[in-house]
Image (cartoon, helix red, strand yellow):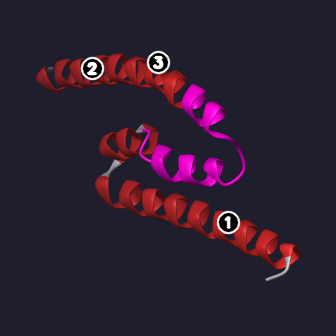
Amino acid sequence: MSPDLLLWLAFALKIIATTVFVVARSLITERAGALVGALVVTLPASAGPAYVLLAMDYDAYFIAAAAMRLGHGRGQHCVLLGLCCSRTAAWNRC
């Protein structure tokens, strides 16, 4: 295969993968409702496929550094999720 064809195939794969994840999350959000939908959309569920796409372009050091930094974001997400759930439970008691 020519290098140009491989480049276009990789580009098409990235576009298709991104589209599939965005549409799937949108459908889940639409069916689940506002609260659950917001939690689904903010979850870092697309990190795995994103790392596969990044690995096609970057070396192992970059991917390892990005994965280490992702842990900080997950911790912050868990704190925000706990606050959101506690406030929602408090509002439902009223």
The percent position of residue 85, horizontal first and vertical second, equals: 24, 25
SS at mark 3? helix
Q: Residues within 10 Å of mark 1 (few under 14, many from 20)?
A: few
Q: Please identify the quarter of the rendering in which residue 63 is found.
A: top right
| In the image, residue 55 lies in the stretch drawn in magenta | yes
Of discs 2 and 3, which sits in the foreground?
3
Query: Which mark, by number, is residue 1?
Result: none
The percent position of residue 29, horizontal first and vertical second, equals: 39, 54
Query: Which mark, by number, is residue 82?
Result: 2
Q: Please identify the quarter of the rendering in which residue 6 is found.
A: bottom right
Give me the C-alpha separation between circle 2 and circle 3. Answer: 16 Å
SS at mark 2? helix
The percent position of residue 72, horizontal first and vertical second, equals: 47, 18
Residue 33 falls left or right of residue 52: left
Q: Earlier in the sequence, mark 1 or mark 3?
A: 1
Q: Please identify the quarter of the rendering in which residue 43 is found.
A: top left
Of discs 2 and 1, which sits in the foreground?
1
Residue interval drawn in magenta: 44-66
The percent position of residue 81, horizontal first and vertical second, equals: 32, 25
Q: Amino acid at mark 3?
A: His
**Residue identifier under label 3:** 72
Q: Is residue 55 above or below residue 89?
A: below
User: Residue placed at 71% from the left, 68% from the top?
Assistant: 10
**Residue identifier under label 1:** 15
Q: Disc 1 vs disc 3: Cβ atoms closer than 8 Å? A: no
Give me the C-alpha separation between circle 2 and circle 1. Answer: 34 Å
Count of numbered circles in the view: 3
User: Residue placed at 62% from the left, 54% from the top?
Assistant: 53
